Amino acid sequence: MGPDYLSELATSLADGFLVTLQLIGWTLLFSTILGTLLGAMRVSPIAPLRFVGTSYVNIFRNTPLVVVFLFVVVGLPGVGIGPSFFWRAVISLSLYTAAFVCECIRSGVNTVDPGQAEAARSIGMGFGASLRHVVLPQAFRAIIPPLVSVYIAMAKNTSVAYAFGITEATYQLKALIEDFPGSLWFNFAGIVAGYILIVAVLSAIASGFERRTAVAR
Amino acid sequence: MSTVLFDNPGPVTRARHRVYTGVALLAFGVLLGFALWQLWSTEQITPDKWEAFTEPHIIQALFEGLLDTLSAAALAITLAVTFGAVFATGRLSDRAWVRWPSWLVVEFFRAVPLLLLILVIFLGFSSLGPYWSLVLGLMLYNGSVLAEIFRAGVQAVPKGQSEAAYAIGMTKSQVLAQILAPQAVRSMLPAIISQCIVALKDTALGYVIGASGILKVGKQIYISPLYNNPFATAVVLAVVFIIVNYSLSRLAVYAEHKMSQRGATTVENVESTTGA
C-alpha cells in the first residue's frame, strides 16, 4: 500500500467516475425527454396514447434493470441494432428510468386541484395559457422532490453497467484488486465516497431549486 | 371525463379526438409492424429461437430458478424488516450514542449502490458464497430504506396519542410498542409491500456474482450454442418478473385502498418504488 497504490487508486477512480458521470448525464437527458413524453401521453385525452403510456410504465417498472440490460446489451445486436457498449448502457438506463420519470410527472400534474384549471378557464385562458401560467408552475414544484429521488436512484443504478462490460466506477473495484491484492476495502471506501459526492451534489441542486420555487401556503 | 388539463369535450373536440386516436393507432401500428419485421428478418422470432422454452427440462429449470429467486427475496425481506425495525427504533432513541450510529448506518447503506455493496460483500467475505452475499446486501440496503419508512410511519401518528399514553403513566418503550408501532404498521403496509417488490427485482443483481436464480438459468440457456437466443430469453425473464411483480403491486394498491377506507393515512416513499 505505498504511493504506487495511491496514484493508481486516484487514476482508476478518475477514469471510472468520468464514465459514470457520462452515463448519468446522457441518461438524465434521454430519460427526462422520454419520461416527459410518456407522462404527457398518460394524461392526454387520447385513449391509445394513454394505453401505450400505461403499458410502458407497467412493463419497465416491473422488469429488473439487469433484464433490461440483457435485452439491450446482449439482445439488440442480434436484432441488427448495435451501437457501442456505452450507448447500449445509456439506452438501457434511459428506458428504465423513463418509466419512473413518467410517474413523477403524471402524479405532479394530478396534484394540481382541478378547480385551479376551471378558474383559469373561467377567466378566459385557453388550454395553452392555463397550462403555462396555472397548472405547470404548480406541478413543477410538486415534481422536484420525487424526481430528484428518481435521478439519485438512477445515478446509483449506473453501477449495473459494470456487469455488462462498461468500465465505470464500480468496475474499478475489481480492476484495482487484480493489481493490488488486499486493497478491497480501501477501493470500496474510495468508490463509495465518489458515489456519495454525486448524490450530495444532486441533492444540493434539488434543494436549491426547491428554495427558489418555494411558496408560502 | 374532466381532468385538470382538459374540460369535458364538446362535439367538435370529440371529432378531433377521434382523428387523433386514428393517427395514434396508425403510428403505433406502423411502429409495432416495423419492430416485428425487424425481429423476423433477423431471425429472432423463428421457432428454433423459442423451442428451448417448450422443453420440459428447461421449463423445470426456469421454475426452480424462480423458486431460488423468490426464496432469496423472501429471506432478504424478512431480515430487512428486522434490520429496519431495529435501526428505526435506534434513530428514534433519546440517547445520542444510539441515535447517531443508527443514523450513520442507515444513511450509509442507502447511499451505496446495491450492486457495489453485493460485490464487496462477495469479494470481502468469500466464505459467504454468492447466495448469502446477495441476501446480506439486499438486507442492508432494503433494511435501511425500511428503517426510514418505519420512522416516517411512527412520526405520522398524531402527537396527542403519545401524550395521552404518557399521561396515563406509560414508559417511552411502552408507548412505542403498544401505541405507536401498531398504528404505524397500518399506514406503512403499502410502502412495505412496494419495498418487497423492489427487493424481489433487486435479486436479479445476483446475476453479477453468479448467485443461483432465474437469471442464472436464463444465462445458461442463451449462452449455449444450441439455442443462442439472448433476445427470446430476455423476453421470457421479463414476462416472469412482470407477472410476479405486477401481482404484488396490485396487492399494494389493494392494501392502500383498505387502509384509506379505514381512515388511516399511508406513508409515501418514492425510493421504495424505484430500485434496480
Image (spheres, coloured by chain):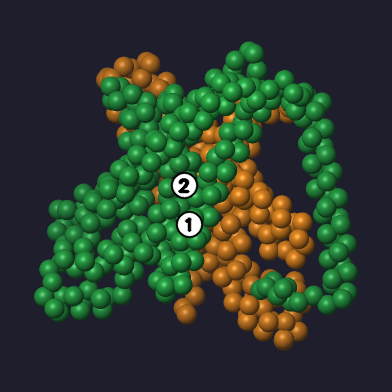
Chain colours: A orange, B green
Q: Residue at x 40, y 71 (%)?
A: B264
Residue B271 visible at all: no
Q: Residue at x 57, y 38 (%)?
A: B240
Q: Where, by quadrant of the figure, is residue A10 drawn?
A: top left
Q: Secondary structure at mark 2?
A: helix
- In the rendered structure, the residue with mark 1 lies on which chain? B
Left or right position of A12 against B175: right
Q: Are marks 1 and 2 in contact (CB under 8 Å)?
A: yes
Q: Amino acid at mark 1?
A: Ala
In-front residue for pair A95/A134? A95
Q: Where, by quadrant of the figure, is residue A26 drawn?
A: top right
Q: Residue at x 32, y 44 (%)?
A: B78
Q: Is residue B247 above or below residue A74?
A: below
Taking the view exactly as shown, the residue that stands out farthest to the bottom is A123
Q: Amino acid at mark 2?
A: Ile
Taking the view exactly as shown, the residue that stands out farthest to the top is B225
Residue A181 on image: x %, y %: 31, 17
In-front residue for pair B201/B251? B251
Reading the chain from its start, which is encountered first: label 1 or label 2? 2
- In the rendered structure, the residue with mark 2 lies on which chain? B
The quarter of the image holding the N terminus of chain B is: bottom right
Question: Which residue in the structure is indicated by mark 1?
Answer: B252
Q: Where, by quadrant of the figure, is residue A136 drawn?
A: bottom right
Q: Is residue A102 above or below residue A92?
A: below
Residue A138 on image: x %, y %: 58, 71
Question: Which residue in the structure is indicated by mark 2?
Answer: B197
Q: Is residue B141 above or below residue B168?
A: above
Left or right position of B79 against B241: left
Number of residues whose C-alpha sits closer than 10 Å to that of mark 2, classed few (under 14), some (14–19) or many (20 or more):
many
Q: Residue at x 13, y 72 (%)?
A: B170
Measured Cα–Cα span from mark 1 to mark 2:
10 Å
